Amino acid sequence: MNPNKALWEKGDFTRIAASMRESGEALVKGFEIRKGLKVLDLGCGDGTTAVPAARLGADVLGVDIARNLVAAGNRRAEQEGLTNCRFQEGDATDLHELADDSFDLSVSIFGAMFAPKPHDVAKEMVRVTRRGGRIVMGNWIPNDPTLVAQILKISSAYTPPPPEGFVSPMTWGIESNVTERFSSAGVPAEKISFARDTFTFNFPRHPAALVDEFRKYYGPTMNAFEAAEKNGRAADLQQELEELFDSQNKSQRKDATTIPATFLRVSVAL
Ligand SMILES: C[S@@+](CC[C@H](N)C(=O)[O-])C[C@H]1O[C@@H](n2cnc3c(N)ncnc32)[C@H](O)[C@@H]1O
C-alpha cells in the first residue's frame, strides 16, 4: 500500500474539513470564477474549495488520493445537485489520467503539498494547466507560529524521524523551494508570486474538542498519538495540543473555537 494514500485514508478528513468551510468559500471567491471555467482541485479532500467553485459555475474536477474523501466529495456534490462537480481518485505525483492543458485553473489548497516527490507534483500541475491559465496553491509554512505548522511541529517531536530522503511537505511553504520546483517544470520565476493569507478553523465546541477531532480523524495526528502511546507520552502530546489550541482560540465564547492560521498563497501564471 502507498504510505501517502494510507495516511489520508486512515482517518476521516471530512471531520476537520467541516471546520474549514467558510475560509474555503472565501478563498474561492477571490479566484474570479466564471461560468464554465475548467478547474482542477488537486488534493481536494471532500471539496472544501471544489464545491464552492462549482457553486459559482465552474466545471470542477476534484482529484484526491484518498478513496473515502473522493466518495465524500461526490456525495456532497450530489446532495447539492452540482452536476458540474465530480471527484475521482488520483495521485498528484502522476496525473496520467489527465490530458495536457486540460484546465484553466488548477488549485491545490493544503493538498498537493502532502504528496511526495514535489518536483513531479509541480511538473504535473504545469502539464495539465493550459498556457494562459493559472495555478494557485495554499501551503502551510514551516515554523510559522499559527495552528497547523505548530500541530505538525509538536507532532514531529513525538514521532520517529522520517526515512532518509523524505522531503517534508512543509518545504512547499518556503518561497525559494516553490520557485525552484516550478522553474524546473519550465515556469519563469517572474510568473510566480506569493502572498500570506489566513485560513480560519471554526468549530462549534471548545478547543479541546477540536483537538479530539484531530486525534481521532486527522491522519498525521493519529500517527503522532500512536507513536506517543508506544512511549507512554500520549497524555503529554494531548496536553501540548490542548494548550496550543487554547492559546490560539480567538472566539469570544468559551464553548466555541475560531482559530486563524497563516498560509503561503502561491500563484503561477502560465
Ligand atoms: C489537509 S487535506 C486538505 C483537503 C482539501 N484541500 C481541503 O482544504 O479541505 C490534504 C488532502 O491532500 C490529499 N493528498 C495527499 N497526498 C496526495 C497525493 N499524492 N495526490 C492527491 N491527493 C493527495 C489527502 O488525501 C487530503 O485530502
Image (tube, rainbow, N blue to C red):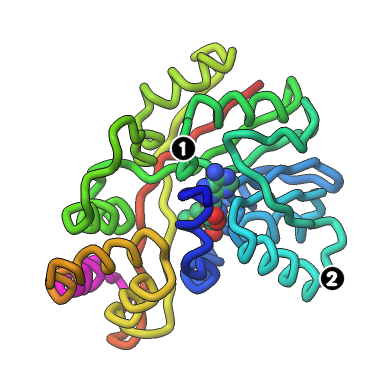
The answer, for residue 109, to whether it is visible in the render is no
The label number, if any, that marks residue 81 in the structure image = 2
- Residue at the limit of the structure toward the bottom, as seen here: 255
Was residue 268 drawn as part of the magenta stretch in this picture?
no
Q: Nearer the viewer, mark 1 or mark 2?
A: 1
The kind of residue tagged 2 is: Gly
The C terminus, quarter of image? top right
Q: Is residue 142 above or below residue 201?
A: above
Q: Give the side of residue 162 with respect to residue 187, left or right.
A: left
Tell me the magenta residue range. 238-252
Nearest the viewer among 11 and 102 is 11
The residue carrying mark 1 is 116
> What residue is at 77 percent from the left and 35 percent from the top?
98
| Main secondary structure of the magenta stretch | helix
Amino acid type at mark 1: Pro
Q: Residue at x 43, y 42 (%)?
A: 139
Q: Position of residue 261 (x, y in %)?
A: 35, 56
Residue 74 shows up from this direction = yes
Q: How far is mark 1 from mark 2, CA to CA? A: 34 Å
Label 1 residue near ligand 1, CB within 8 Å: yes
Sequence order check, earlier mark of 1 and 2: 2
**Residue 50 on image: x %, y %:** 68, 55
Q: Is residue 189 above or below residue 259?
A: above
| Foreground of the two, 129 or 154 | 154
Closer to the camera in the image, 106 or 165: 165
